[in-house]
Image (cartoon, grey):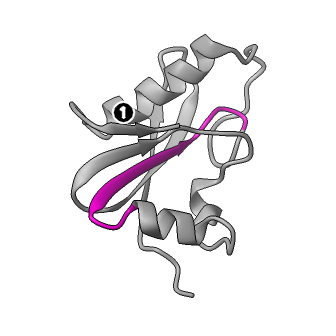
Amino acid sequence: MATLKQTVRFCTSSDDVRIAYATVGRGRPLVRTAHFLTHVELDVASPVWMPWLSELSRDRLLVRYDGRNCGLSDRTTTPLGLDAWLADLEAAIDAAKLDRFSLFG
């Protein structure tokens, strides 16, 4: 099974946490929200995640990100909560320059 070709970039959340995000595919954007134990760099080669990512990026631009304390994103002592998760999501959406998109959570 071949690894998907993706682009990994970094952005900064509103509370100054560095967030890794990745894009793969082309078409109407689909944003997959972060969940526990993501790693945008390694997930594309995972036998568990690669089939999902391949299908989700077919005919779409798939945007996904590592939430704080996961994968390539910064580790922080900031308490995790809805505001922190929302700041990470907003940072990835803004950095990818998305105005309209579907959200997969």
Residue at image position (62%, 35%) is: 67
Residue at image position (30%, 55%) is: 61
The image quarter containing residue 90 is top left
Where in the figure is residue 78, as x and y percent of width and height? 73, 15
* Magenta span of residues: 57-69
Q: Amino acid at mark 1?
A: Ile
Q: Secondary structure beneath disc 1?
A: helix
Residue at image position (74%, 46%) is: 37
The image quarter containing residue 27 is bottom left
Count of residue discs:
1
Where in the figure is residue 19, as x and y percent of width and height? 54, 36
Where in the figure is residue 33, as x and y percent of width and height? 52, 38
Relative to residue 54, is residue 71 depicted above or below? above
The residue wearing badge 1 is 93
Relative to residue 76, is residue 7 depicted above or below? below
In the image shown, does 90 or 13 lie closer to the viewer? 90
Asked whether residue 58 is drawn in magenta, I would say yes
In the image shown, does 98 or 75 lie closer to the viewer? 98
Residue at image position (48%, 29%) is: 89
The image quarter containing residue 47 is bottom right
